[in-house]
């Protein structure tokens, strides 16, 4: 591997940096999503919504205290600001969660684009070297020419390999973010509907008393 790396020429060093960045981001995001999925507590979310239907806000806060489920955090934010702007409060909390979930995705996307370009750059340098050697030594020393061609092929293969291996986790992480966004929208909308029904019921009762 070291011999192949050295044969690839100077472009292999930025490609090595790209591969380190890619592996670091992938490992960090895997750990992040494993932790997020382990912290999910769907029964508690359903129970919280059921308590909201009865207007028992105190019990909701009590049961949700200490929960690390991102859905619970967003719902609690909406509940705490229900008398002012529940929707905007949950939108703000949801945006913060989305920002946390999309962290480092830009870096991974950049590496997917940059690595093949660096590979092509290395290819061009290798071909230039080959033609330079060919013009200097002629065809009497083909091994000198093939060294430049090998450099070109190694950098291309490395750049493409980094990009290909990055695409699969990148798409997986994006799908996780999209699923989380759908879940947030689903439960936030449910809470808004429940709260509107409570307000309408309270208004109706007041009207009947009059």
Image: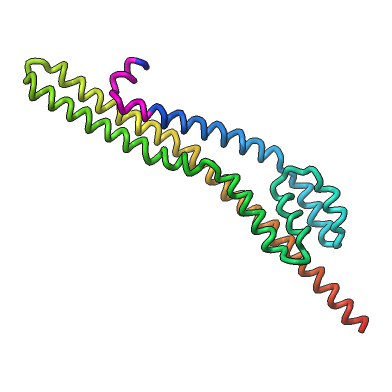
Residue 95 figure quarter = bottom right
Q: Magenta segment, which residues?
A: 3-15
Please tell me whether residue 113 is drawn above or below residue 73 in the rendered image.
above
- Percent x, y for residue 192? 73, 64
Which residue sits at x=87%, y=55%? 58
Residue 85 figure quarter = bottom right
In magenta segment, residue 13: yes
In magenta segment, residue 149: no
Q: Main secondary structure of the magenta part?
A: helix
In the rendered image, the quadrant that contains the C terminus is bottom right
Describe residue 125's horizontal placement relative to residue 50 as left or right. Answer: left
Describe residue 44's horizontal placement relative to residue 148 as left or right. Answer: right
- Percent x, y for residue 184? 66, 54
Please tell me whether residue 155 is drawn above or below residue 51 in the rendered image.
above
Which residue sits at x=44%, y=42%? 109
In the rendered image, the quadrant that contains the N terminus is top left
Residue 27 figure quarter = top right
Looking at this view, is 50 or 9 the one in front?
9
Looking at this view, is 192 or 130 the one in front?
130
- Percent x, y for residue 98? 60, 50
Indicate how the structure is coloured in the image. rainbow
């Amino acid at each position: 591997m070291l011999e192949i790396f050295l044969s690839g020429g100077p472009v292999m060093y930025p490609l090595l940096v790209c591969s380190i960045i890619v592996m670091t981001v992938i490992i960090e995001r895997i750990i992040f999503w494993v932790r997020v999925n382990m912290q999910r507590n769907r029964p508690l979310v359903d129970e919280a919504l059921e308590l909201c239907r009865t207007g028992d806000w105190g019990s909701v806060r009590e049961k949700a205290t200490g929960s690390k489920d991102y859905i619970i955090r967003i719902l609690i934010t909406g509940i705490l600001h229900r008398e002012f702007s529940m929707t905007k409060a949950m939108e703000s909390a949801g945006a913060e969660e989305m920002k946390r979930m999309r962290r480092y995705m830009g870096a991974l996307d950049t590496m997917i684009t940059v690595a093949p370009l660096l590979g092509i750059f290395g290819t061009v340098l290798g071909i230039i070297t080959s033609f330079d050697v060919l013009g200097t030594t002629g065809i009497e020393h083909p091994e000198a020419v093939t060294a430049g061609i090998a450099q070109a092929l190694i950098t291309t293969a490395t750049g493409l390999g980094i990009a290909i291996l990055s695409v699969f986790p990148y798409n997986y992480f994006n799908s996780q973010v999209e699923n989380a966004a759908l879940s947030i929208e689903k439960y936030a909308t449910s809470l808004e509907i429940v709260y509107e029904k409570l307000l309408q019921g309270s208004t109706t009762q007041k009207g009947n008393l009059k």
